[in-house]
Amino acid sequence: MRKIKSYILQAGRISLLAFFISVGVKAQEIQNLSGANSAQDDQNPVWIGDGVLLFTRANHFQNVGGITDPGDIWMTKKDSDGNWSDAIHRPDLSTDGYDVALGLEDLLTLLVYHRGQDKTGVFQYSKFGSEWNFLRQVSIEGIFELEGNVTGRVTKGGKYIFLSGKNSDSRGNEDIYVSEKIGPIQWSQLSNLGNVINTPGQEISPFFDPETDLLYFSSNMQIGAEGKDIFVAKRMSDSFDQWSAPKKWIQLNSPGSESSVTFVSDQEIVWTTTQNSDGFADLVTFKSPVPLEIPTDFNSPTIVAVVQSEQSNASAKVSELKPIFPSSSVGIPEVKWEEKEVEIKEEPLRWLVIDQKNKTRVEEFEVFLGDSNLGEPLDSKNLRLSELQGSTNFLRFEAPQFFPVTISLSTVRTNEPNVVLMTRAEAGNSLLLDQVNFKRGTAELEDDSTKAFLDQLAGFLNDNPEVIIRVSGHTDNAGDPGLNKALSLDRAGAVRDYLVEKGVAFERLRIAGWGGTRPIASNATETGRSKNRRVEITVEN
């Protein structure tokens, strides 16, 4: 839980900040889209008609980039009986990077956002038969500056694109931006929607309906948000810089996180929620058609402006002005500052622990503070980054029959699942000891972090006495091959000796030194050479 100090600016007339009050409503049963969901994140649904729903699936072994791919485009179809088909991967719309469908620009042209090694930006695809064919990239000024997992939609008629992402002018994390089409492949500069919509928190997955002037989006900092919730705001002028105060769409929201509304019809919608999926997003809809209780009666906005950011991750200062009118009708309203405390819920970290060889999900795992072998396991479903910072630099993951894995806290992401690859201790599997370092040109273990890493390995081997391993040393190809081979063997021996000191039986540890004969990267660059200077273990039994 984070606390943010704030001040309130009420535009227009005097009004009171109203908080959402829980009232009894008739239960409306929500259901998953049957075969369309997976154990991974399924997000950004986009209905394109003809029974077809496109969405982004992260970290699936069938993705173009494999299990570490942050998102490919998949498809499900709704039949005449209302059933949704099993999800189908669309490699014709996907890359080895992050991909999200933005919707139809016209009847035959689909816009897709890619962020990867070969393609970054928004691209046009045209439908020919059952396949989508790449056409060309469109030009949107400012698109390359957007960071994070960009989400958004093109509006009906193809005149505007709304995108969310983090930019230099963002108020906090992701903000929502709009761009207008000005030519066949030219779009205007991305424009921030301003302080009514965007807060110092996250605003994502925008969808704007030009027929109603309603903007649907997800936020974790608008008033009433619990995690990320879906809000609706109304455009108040012909431009995109005047909006009503956003209202929470209570009908859709739960204690989990919700986002990404798409309309299948005027009476049917699909959105995503983490309510029943251990923090991973699922596609959901109402089990039976129900009247959509979209917010109405939109009011003047409350504008929030950041004036100062504190260094702490647990808090930030924001400011608002509240006009206080005099008792008589004469005179200029007095403006004063009113300080408030606003609680912001920080979402738990999400983990996708994967068997590196079989590309399957490891369900039974525990997380520990990685700086020590001591201590009880942490509550992996309720870990928050702000609570960990200052108490540890590493997290250690353990699972039955898998070698422990330690990750740096600096690499942990808060807005998407963190992929942790684990290696099962079975014959033939190899594990890179990437945190084992030696003093330059010697076989002497370098520092305490190396020893702490080997302590964890020793603990695993002592708990699994049937496992026999071979420790293999490697170098780059610089220098004398004979000396390199001797050094690599000595380093493997140093690792073996340390493990023996920690109680591992000598006969379970075999060693080999390969010098520079088995590189895993090019020796033409220092980066490649550093990767080749390594120690690995291989399970022999």
Image: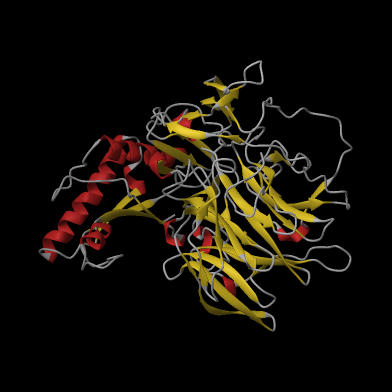
Q: Nearer the viewer, residue 229 or 64?
A: 229
Can you give x and y, in whole percent of width and height, for residue 502 in the image? 33, 35
Q: Nearer the viewer, residue 247 or 540?
A: 247
Can you give x and y, in whole percent of width and height, for residue 8 in the image? 57, 27
Question: Where 12 falls versus 425 (above or below)?
Answer: above
Seen at 49% across and 30% down, the residue is 318
- From the viewer's perspective, tell me whether residue 260 is left or right of residue 461: right
Q: Is residue 305 visible?
A: yes
Q: Is residue 57 visible?
A: no
Question: Where 325 falls versus 388 (above or below)?
Answer: above
Name the colouring of the figure: secondary structure
Seen at 45% across and 63% down, the residue is 141
- From the viewer's perspective, tell me whether residue 352 is left or right of residue 464: right
The image quarter containing residue 342 is: top right
Can you give x and y, in whole percent of width and height, for residue 256 in the image? 68, 39
- Quarter of the image with the N terminus is top right
Can you give x and y, in whole percent of width and height, for residue 321 in the image? 54, 27
- Quarter of the image with the C terminus is bottom left
